[in-house]
């Protein structure tokens, strides 16, 4: 199939590469000419601007927007609304707020343009591992573009099937899910990221305690000099806390057990805040997720080894860099 990709950053560029590896044809656009030329050299069709980009796509067009959430994405969606035709599909694969999806779907549907919101998880590892996708919006378009989603998804891999799933949607076991109407895909991804905050915080605090058991605050006969990289590695193998986040922690600690590269300043990308806002709206208690978010706020004032662990995990899975020291 053919897909147009707008935004060729850490994830957008690798989504294009994974699709081309699977035999799909991609037209690409980015404000960075170097990014466009780079992917053109790998086989993608380059474009000068959005008008040229849309002109190169075959109808019914499929356009994937992979840009930072907020004003940049909104402005691009509005501009595309004036260039696309009825029957075309616009996908927002970034981390937009699900309220924005509802508004965008209503605006585009009035013009006959289909809209999909695709919560996409996989970070900088997605090219090789694939992307877990949570899809909301127009069901007919989601079904039509199934070959695109199937090519991007991780596939079954070595994960055994869950007992009792007979008769359920088999695409879920490939790593992608149609969630429901506009906004539902990004809503599910938002909660996914809120949970991620809590899991990361638990690992970070645990490794901080392991490290500080060798501090003067502990009686000398109960001080242990523990090898954190080895603990992370052994937990990866058969432990109940084994996970991809632990895998990434093990990589970071194997590279440098003291994490000297990191200050411990931990940003939040928005989904954690939105998750707590949703919990408040629904009157659902979310003590762990709230505490994990507030810990990130505190990290910008005073750093601990736990925050270094958090920062290292963020770099490993998403390529997130700490802000320059001022």
Image: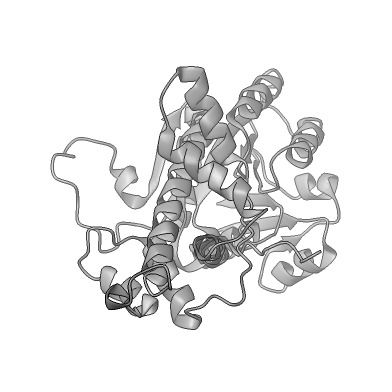
Above or below: residue 48 compared with residue 215: above
Above or below: residue 17 compared with residue 286: below
- Quadrant where the C terminus sits is bottom right
Q: Nearer the viewer, residue 91 or 68?
A: 68
Residue 305 visible? The answer is: yes
Place of residue 297 in the rendered image (x, y in percent of width and height, measured from the top left) = 62, 46
Left or right: where does residue 296 sit relative to residue 160? Answer: right
Q: Nearer the viewer, residue 204 or 137?
A: 204
Quarter of the image where one finds residue 169: top left
Place of residue 254 in the rendered image (x, y in percent of width and height, measured from the top left) = 44, 81
Residue located at (82% from left, 61% from top): 32
Quarter of the image where one finds residue 80: top right
Above or below: residue 55 compared with residue 41: above
Q: Nearer the viewer, residue 45 or 203?
A: 203
Residue located at (33% from left, 44% from top): 172
Above or below: residue 119 compared with residue 131: above
Residue located at (30% from left, 48% from top): 173
Left or right: where does residue 247 sit relative to residue 240? Answer: right
Place of residue 73 in the rendered image (x, y in percent of width and height, measured from the top left) = 73, 40
Residue 141 visible? The answer is: no
Colour scheme used in the picture? one colour
Count the numbered circles shown. Answer: 0
Q: Nearer the viewer, residue 96 or 26?
A: 96
Place of residue 50 in the rendered image (x, y in percent of width and height, measured from the top left) = 82, 46
Quarter of the image where one finds residue 79: top right
Left or right: where does residue 45 sit relative to residue 82? Answer: left
Residue located at (40% from left, 65% from top): 207
């Amino acid at each position: 199939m053919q897909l147009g990709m707008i935004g060729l950053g850490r994830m957008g560029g690798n989504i294009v590469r994974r699709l081309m590896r699977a035999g799909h044809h991609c037209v690409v656009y980015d404000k960075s000419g170097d990014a466009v030329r780079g992917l053109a050299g790998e086989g993608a069709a380059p474009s000068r601007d959005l008008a040229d980009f849309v002109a190169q796509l075959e109808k019914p067009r499929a356009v994937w927007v992979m840009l930072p959430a907020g004003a940049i994405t909104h402005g691009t969606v509005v501009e595309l609304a004036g260039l696309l035709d009825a029957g075309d599909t616009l996908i927002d694969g970034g981390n937009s707020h699900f309220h924005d999806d509802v508004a965008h779907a209503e605006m585009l549907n009035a013009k006959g343009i289909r809209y999909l919101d695709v919560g996409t998880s996989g970070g900088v590892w997605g090219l090789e591992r694939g992307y877990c996708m949570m899809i909301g919006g127009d069901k007919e378009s989601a079904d039509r573009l199934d070959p695109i989603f199937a090519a991007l998804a991780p596939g079954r891999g070595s994960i055994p099937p869950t007992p009792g799933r007979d008769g359920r949607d088999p695409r879920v076991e490939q790593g992608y899910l149609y969630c429901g109407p506009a906004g539902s895909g990004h809503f599910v991804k938002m909660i996914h990221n809120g949970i991620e905050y809590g899991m990361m915080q638990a690992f970070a605090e645990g490794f901080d305690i392991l490290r500080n058991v060798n501090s003067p605050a502990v009686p000398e006969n109960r001080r242990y000099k523990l090898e954190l990289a080895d603990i992370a590695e052994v937990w990866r193998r058969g432990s109940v806390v084994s996970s991809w986040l632990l895998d990434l922690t093990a990589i970071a600690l194997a590279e440098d057990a003291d994490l000297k590269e990191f200050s411990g300043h931990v940003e939040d990308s928005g989904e954690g805040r939105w998750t707590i806002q949703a919990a408040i709206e629904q009157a659902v208690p979310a003590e762990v997720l709230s505490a994990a978010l507030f810990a990130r706020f505190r990290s910008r004032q005073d750093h601990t080894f736990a925050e270094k662990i958090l920062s290292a995990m963020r770099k490993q899975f998403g390529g997130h860099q700490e802000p320059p020291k001022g």
